[in-house]
Image: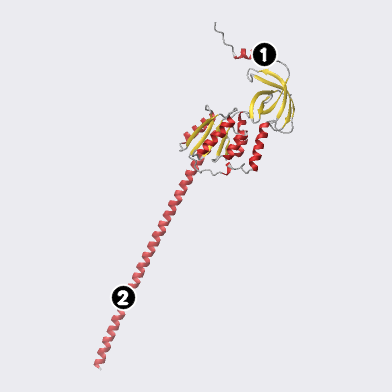
Amino acid sequence: MTRKPATVTELLEALAASVPDKPVSATGVLQSWRVGSTWSRCELVTYEGPEVVARIVVAIPPGTSIQAPERSLEGTTAIVDGRFQVHPLYGPVQLTAQHIRVTATESPSEAAAHTRLDRLRAAGLIDRNQSLQLSSRPCRIGLITPMGGGAGGTDFLHRLEDSGERIDVITRPVPMGGPLASRAIPAAVVEMCADVVDAIVICRGGGSASDLSTFNHPAVIEAICMATRPVIMAVGHTTDTTFADRVAHTSLHTPSAAASWLIDLHRSAERQAAIDRAKTESAAASAARRSATAAERAALDLAEHAGSQARRAKLVLHCAVALAVFVVAALLILRML
């Protein structure tokens, strides 16, 4: 006999029955804080080196005891005491906190990223990608986008297509999260640098801080610094910032913003080209007018010179005739004498 499928409520009730209702204590990195009017929520994340290996949602009710330094709790390492709870809307399983105690103000992933940045800075490579010259009209783009599709890459491509600008895009889908991402993204950057592209755009939609932790990975940071093409970061939402944003040539808030930025570059280049053409045509017209004026002046000078010569010739002729008359008259007078 076919078993009747359970409803989601029934499944969660069964799960709740199997979750021990006893105090637990867990340590990890606090990320993705969402502060509500009453309850707040965040993630408690476990890292192995720079990699995220586990995470759980932490619900923070009003009155939770929090021991922390005078700074944001985002990215701090803490111990959370509480109880597991199965919630039908915010679960399925969450850790409801009773007490939070911050033990370190920097997560292991941030520490690894800072160490890599310090090494790159010491080697004089921290600003290397930012110093690369970007074409005023990049026409061939290498796009690194999430494997399996996603709103980030789709939004970027649709906006370029709708603009009507002639921009060729070479797409390279890679994992943007998980253990493979920290190797796949640097490999894609190297591959794109070997191709003839004007710039590399890394696109990804938003997510939690742990989702975007790949872009704090030392290997990703170093790959961007060492890239031989300008790297444009377009990862997450407006409020998301990663270490990769700090070392990339240009950082845009979202994939759509990156597409708009490229379109504006093209249109600005077209406007400047039109202005330059107009200036060239105006300069040529001015030169032609100056040349015509000079030719006209030369013709007038030549005509005036010719008239002057004619007048002198006429005067000489008159003088010669007068002299001849005078000579003849003088001879006649001498004969008469």
Numbered circles on residues, count? 2
Instruction: Tell me what residue is drawn at x 59 percent, y 43 percent.
Output: 128
Q: Quadrant of residue 59?
A: top right
Label 2 crowd (10 A; few <14 / some 14-19 / many >=20): few
Which of 15 and 239 lies nearest the eye of the viewer? 15
The coloring applied to the image is secondary structure
Q: Is residue 302 above or below residue 232?
A: below
Secondary structure of residue under mark 2: helix
Which of 323 and 25 lies nearest the eye of the viewer? 25
Which of 212 and 70 lies nearest the eye of the viewer? 212
Residue 31 is situated, as x and y percent measured from the top left of the image, at: 66, 28
Residue 169 is situated, as x and y percent measured from the top left of the image, at: 48, 35
Residue 151 is situated, as x and y percent measured from the top left of the image, at: 53, 29
Q: Mark 1 belongs to which amino acid?
A: Ser
Please state which of the two labelled residues, at mark 1 or mark 2, is closer to the viewer: 1
Whether residue 32 can be seen here: no
Q: Earlier in the sequence, mark 1 or mark 2?
A: 1
Furthest-bottom residue in view?
A: 337
Instruction: Tell me what residue is drawn at x 48 percent, y 44 percent.
Output: 271
What numbered label is drawn on residue 314?
2
Label 1 crowd (10 A; few <14 / some 14-19 / many >=20): few
Residue at label 1? 18
From the viewer's perspective, is 295 left or right of 254? left
State the quadrant of the N terminus: top right
Separation of disc 1 and disc 2 at Cα? 130 Å
Residue 100 is situated, as x and y percent measured from the top left of the image, at: 73, 26
Secondary structure of residue under mark 1: helix
Whether residue 232 can be seen here: yes
Q: Mark 2 belongs to which amino acid?
A: Lys
Q: Quadrant of residue 8?
A: top right
From the viewer's perspective, is 307 left or right of 106? left
